[in-house]
Every structure is written in structure tokens, then in C-alpha cells.
Image: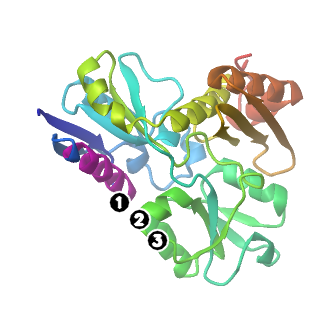
Amino acid sequence: MTLLRIGSRGSQLALWQANHISALLRERGHQVDIEIIKTTGDIITGVALAKVGAKGMFTKEIEDALAEGRVDLAVHSLKDLPTELPAGFELAAVTRREYPNDVFLSVRYSGIAALPQGARVGTSSLRRQAQLKTLRPDLDIHPLRGNVDTRIRKLEEGGYDAIILAAAGLNRLGRTELVREVIPTETMCPAAGQGALGIEIRAGDTGLRASLSFLDDHDARAATACERALLQSLGGGCQVPIGAFATVTGGKLTLQAVVARPDGSRILRETLSGTDPLTLGADAGKLLLRKGADEILREVYGEERTLRP
């Protein structure tokens, strides 16, 4: 077997993911190396993600290495991967999905409802902020950046009364000791692709695609393709207040979708079912646009622009 070089970010979670895929490939007889690549999102750490606003902020430099032939495949958190891949790349596999929910972490409080008036909650996600403020307009939301250990340490040191993180990353790293509440997807709709890994390769590399096919989970690919189609229909990236979560039961997809103002003053919800992932995602996007999602998203983007119909 030839040597396969994986491109990965250097965070603890990213390396867990890269090593997880590496172990699965080695079981198939491949030799594997991991190359750590620093991305824009890793360099700009003192600013809330929503204010950075660059699509591909966690993926572009890795794609550059892929295009130059320095690595053969990239392992991404699928929620970080833009819905439109640049020319020359393809999504070879979407792995079986880890638990997709967001979770509430706190030293002192048992859940969102137990937080006192004006409690300080940490998150840099506009999607989480918007849905939290819908539930509890009184909460004081503050930016929270850094790797999982850094965020948990800031909570333990008393900088926040609670923080919101993805269950998947905590489960993978074994850092669930401060999880007090698993937030239902009906209460806090996850990010598109949350909990799944996306394996990106150079387009047309049929041999590598075949070698990676065992990693591709049919239901996870269908559900996340639906979620990403919704995101694309709204013209959104991973740092906008859009939630999308699809489930597959008996070959039928059900999609929950949310668009909300960051201050929680307005939230739009849609639930649709269907069998074609791309059509279902696009149809849900159209319904949200008719309800006024374009107005909310223009406010977030800070500019007047026409969203894709």
C-alpha cells in the first residue's frame, strides 16, 4: 500500500479526528502520516468567529496543501467545510455521525432553565447565541474561543456561568465531566454537518476515492447533504445563525431548519420531510426565505445582497 498523507489542523480535537481516520486506514493496510497545517481560524483567536466572517477559515490552507500535493486527503469537521467546495476538490466520504446535539456545561448550574437572571454564557456561535436568547433573553452572551480544554478551563476558572459546546467533540476527547444538559435539537438546532467528519480529496482521484469508500456512511451523507443544501440555498456559511438537522428513517429524510436574529428577537422554524436530500434542503430554504429569512441574514451580513432563491 502507498503512503497516505493526511492534512489536519493542530488542535487537540482535529488531531483526534485525524488519528481516528489514520487508525482506520492502517487497519486496511495503509501507511499513514499526518501533517499539521495552521489555518486562518487558528491564527485569528482573539475575535469572535462571526466577526471574522471568512468562508473556509478552517479549511483553505489545508486545501492549498492538498492542491500542491503535500497531502493526499484532508480530515475536517464537516460543519467547518463550506457548502461549495473550490474547483479541484471533492468530498470522498462522510463518516458515521457522532451525537449531533449541543450541550450545556457548568460548574454550578444544572441546565439553561436553572441559570440566574443575567448569567454569563460563553459561545462564539451566532447560531447558539440566537437560540439561547430566544429561550432566555436575559442571558449575557460573551465570546468564547480556543480549543476544548481552553474553553473548559475558562469555565472552571469562573469566567463564565456556563458554556455551550458540541457534544461530538467532548465525547471524542472524553471531556464530558461538566456536561449538565443535553440540549434537544428542537430547542437548539445544530449546525449543518455537526458531529460528522468530511474527508476531502483532489477531484478525480478515483483510486483514493475507492480506498476511502469504506469510511462513507450512507445515512450520514444523505442527512448532511440535506443540511448543507439548506445552508447553500440561504447563501450562508458556518458562522451565521442558521441551524439544520436532518434524520433518516426508513429511507425518508426529515429536516429541522432554523434562522434567527442573533439577539433572539425573531426566530423562523421549518420542518419538512422528503426522499431527495438536495431537493428537501433547497425547498426548506425557499420556505424560510418566504417567511423573512433574507431580511434576518442581510442584517447579519451587514449589507444588502440578494440571496439565492
139 w.r.t. 189: above or below: below
Q: Quadrant of the C terminus?
A: top right
Of the residues shown, which amino acid type is indicated by label 3? Arg
Give the number of the disc on residue 175: 3
x and y percentages locating residue 269 in the rendered image: 82, 40
Residue appearing at x 52%, y 49% in the figure:
195
Mark 1 secondary-structure assignment: helix
Residue appearing at x 74%, y 40% in the figure:
256
Q: Which residues are magenta?
A: 11-26
Question: Are the residues flagged by discs 1 and 2 in contact, CB closer than 8 Å?
Answer: yes
x and y percentages locating residue 145 in the rendered image: 51, 59
Pointer 2 residue? 173
Of the residues shown, which amino acid type is indicated by label 2? Leu
181 w.r.t. 67: above or below: below
Give the number of the disc on residue 12: 1
Q: Quadrant of the N terminus?
A: top left
Instruction: Give whichever of discs 1 and 2 has the lower sequence position.
Output: 1
Instruction: Give whichever of discs 1 and 3 has the lower sequence position.
Output: 1
